[in-house]
């Protein structure tokens, strides 16, 4: 009887240890070796994106406040889009607005991060994606009540009235963060530059569609959408810097994640 009892405890302990091992391995950061020049290139890209995005966002904000620069095209672009309106095109734009909206997009992000987190050997990249999306939401919610920019006239809105502030566009910022950060996290682990180009071109097309839908439906000015794109460049740069700092190792540096040792040169 004592032996059976001891065996049962050992089995339970083994199962607990196995469960903990799986959980631990899932959250071991996926470190990887790369050439020193490649890592420096990633850091340079991150700095350029953050600097460029910040500068362009500030320029757009100042232009809106002084009604100059990029904001000077807000009225003319809105009037031009009014001439393109038609019932079939409006249906397409409403569909895009729903896909990139505050209900559908968070669901899509949640599904992607959960499925990716369970399917991947390491959960680091889905966590970075989720963090980038949350950062975009927080930044948008901080800026909106500070700038307090009014939206275009209510009579021009084709999908219900919206009385919230306009600068920056939350729809566009969410679409940019999701598409750009996802593209980086996927293609930064692949050595095929053509696939990376295709991935980022696809992300750019998605961003363009999300932006046009918000402008066409009458909810934002052009400078709102541009400000969101520029903010997303900052978030993308931060994601690149964080991911590179935590995962990129050059020959001679120690790999600390046990499951990442297979990425060492010569393995």
Image (spheres, grey):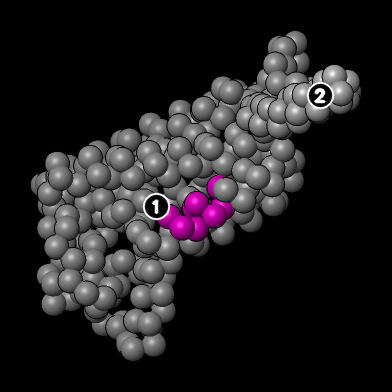
Instruction: Locate residue 127 relative to residue 141 in the image: left or right.
Output: right
Residue contact at pointers 1 and 2, CB within 8 angstroms: no
User: Where is 108 relative to 188, above or below?
Assistant: below
Which residue is at a point 62% across and 37% down the rendered structure image? 123
- Residue found farthest to the front: 1
Which residue is at a point 71% across and 28% down the rendered structure image? 16
Which residue is at a point 30% across and 72% down the rendered structure image? 216
Q: Nearer the viewer, residue 163 or 15?
A: 15
Examine the residues drawn in magenta and state their main secondary structure: helix
Occupied quadrant, residue 190: top right
User: Where is 199 relative to 104, above or below?
Assistant: above
- Residue found farthest to the bottom: 87
Query: For the residues carrying marks 1 and 2, which lies nearer the camera in this image?
Result: 2
Occupied quadrant, residue 210: bottom left
Q: Which residue is mark 2?
A: 5
Report x, y in % for residue 253: 71, 12
Q: Secondary structure at mark 2?
A: helix
- Residues drawn in magenta: 106-113
Q: CA distance from mark 1 to mark 2?
A: 55 Å
Instruction: Locate residue 12 relative to residue 1 in the image: left or right.
Output: left
**Residue 133 appears in the picture as rendered:** yes
Q: Secondary structure at mark 1?
A: helix
Which is more N-terminal, label 2 or label 1? 2
**Residue 230 appears in the picture as rendered:** no
Q: Quadrant of the N terminus?
A: top right
User: Where is 165 relative to 251, above or below?
Assistant: below
Instruction: Locate residue 167 relative to residue 256 in the image: left or right.
Output: left
Report x, y in % for residue 255: 72, 17
Occupied quadrant, residue 100: bottom left
Report x, y in % for residue 77: 25, 68
Which residue is at a point 48% across and 61% down the rendered structure image? 206
Q: Which residue is mark 1?
A: 174
């Amino acid at each position: 009887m004592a032996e059976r009892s001891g065996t049962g405890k050992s089995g339970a302990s083994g199962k607990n240890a196995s469960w903990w091992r799986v959980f631990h391995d899932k959250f071991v950061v996926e470190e990887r070796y790369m050439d020193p020049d490649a890592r420096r290139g990633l850091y340079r890209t991150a700095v350029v994106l953050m600097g460029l995005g910040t500068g362009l966002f500030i320029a757009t904000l100042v232009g809106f406040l002084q009604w100059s620069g990029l904001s000077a095209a807000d009225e003319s672009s809105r009037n031009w889009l009014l001439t393109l309106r038609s019932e079939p095109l409006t249906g397409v734009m409403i569909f895009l607005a729903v896909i990139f909206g505050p209900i559908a997009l968070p669901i899509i992000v949640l599904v992607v991060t959960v499925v990716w987190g369970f399917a991947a050997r390491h959960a680091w990249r889905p966590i970075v994606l989720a963090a980038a999306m949350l950062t975009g939401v927080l930044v948008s919610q901080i800026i909106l009540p500070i700038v307090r920019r009014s939206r275009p006239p209510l009579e021009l809105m084709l999908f219900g009235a919206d009385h919230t502030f306009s600068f920056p566009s939350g729809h566009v910022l969410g679409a940019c963060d999701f598409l750009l950060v996802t593209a980086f996290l996927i293609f930064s682990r692949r050595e095929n530059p053509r696939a990376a180009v295709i991935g980022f071109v696809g992300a750019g097309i998605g961003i363009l569609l999300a932006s046009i839908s918000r402008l066409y439906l009458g909810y934002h000015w052009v400078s709102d959408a541009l400000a969101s794109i520029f903010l997303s460049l900052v978030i993308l740069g931060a994601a690149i810097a964080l991911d590179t700092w935590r995962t990129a190792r050059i020959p001679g540096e120690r790999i600390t994640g046990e499951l990442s040792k297979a990425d060492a040169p010569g393995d």
